[in-house]
Image (cartoon, rainbow, N blue to C red):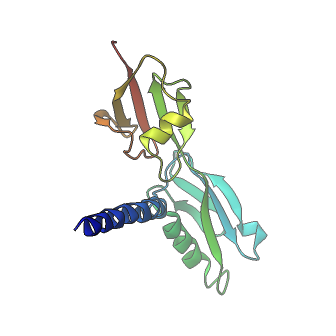
């Protein structure tokens, strides 16, 4: 009976370990672009159609032959498809398009951490990792009182745990402890 319990526990631990990287990959795969992200667009064999571009607040990029392309709110795979369909036919027979994120937009951390400020988002980023990027807690930090809001809605604030995920444009506030 004990052997079965240990086997069950081991299986649960293995499933958790295997799904964590998958969850980070899925989060990266479903990542919606926003202002502040920097894209790399490469068209194999077409150097003048390849570029790196920072997405500004307009939410669009100006791409050769295709003009203005709205990119905010779309995944890199969706942008790849838009460019492929736009170039296929009149410009290229079968374009080989690659769209990747060079740098992600920032998340922000303020309050009782050693280096508050903005940091580039990374897929799979947790509250605990964000605090580590900011140099860790100060001696006055209320470690159990970590609040999160997002630039898109600063009125929506909620308490988070170290294992919760952080998204681009999130703002973490580490409050001061009274003791």
Total marks in image: 0
Q: Quadrant of the N terminus?
A: bottom left
The image quadrant that residue 80 belongs to is: bottom right
> Which residue: 42% across, 34% down?
171
Q: In this view, which residue lies farthest toward the top?
A: 179
Residue 156 in the image: above or below residue 140: below
Give the residue displayed 34% in from the left and 39% down from the top.
Answer: 161
Q: Position of residue 32 (x, y in %)?
A: 45, 57
Identity of the residue drawn at 37% across and 66% down? 15
Front position in the image: 7 or 40: 7
- Left or right: 104 in relation to 46: left
Q: Nearer the viewer, residue 110 or 95?
A: 110
Pick the front one: 98 or 3 = 3
Q: Position of residue 130 (x, y in %)?
A: 49, 38
Q: Quadrant of the C terminus?
A: top left
The part of the image, by quadrant, that contains residue 140 is top left
Please state the horizontal and vertical placement of residue 165, each as a whole percent of the image.
Answer: 40, 47
Q: Is residue 14 left or right of residue 93?
A: left
The one nearer the camera, 135 or 90, is 135
């Amino acid at each position: 009976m004990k052997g079965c319990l240990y086997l069950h526990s081991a299986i649960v631990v293995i499933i958790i370990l295997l799904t964590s990287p998958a969850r980070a990959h899925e989060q990266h795969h479903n990542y919606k672009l926003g202002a502040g992200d920097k894209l790399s667009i490469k068209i194999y064999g077409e150097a003048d159609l390849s570029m790196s571009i920072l997405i500004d607040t307009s939410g669009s990029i100006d791409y050769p032959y295709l003009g203005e392309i709205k990119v905010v709110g779309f995944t890199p795979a969706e942008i790849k498809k838009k460019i492929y369909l736009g170039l296929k036919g009149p410009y290229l027979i079968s374009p080989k398009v690659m769209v990747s994120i060079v740098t992600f937009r920032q998340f922000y951390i303020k309050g009782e951490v050693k280096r508050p400020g903005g940091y580039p988002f990374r897929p799979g980023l947790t509250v605990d990792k964000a605090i580590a990027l900011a140099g860790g807690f100060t001696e006055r930090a209320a470690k159990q009182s970590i609040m999160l809001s997002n630039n898109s809605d600063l009125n929506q604030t909620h308490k988070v745990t170290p294992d919760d995920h952080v998204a681009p444009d999130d703002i973490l506030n580490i409050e001061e402890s009274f003791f």
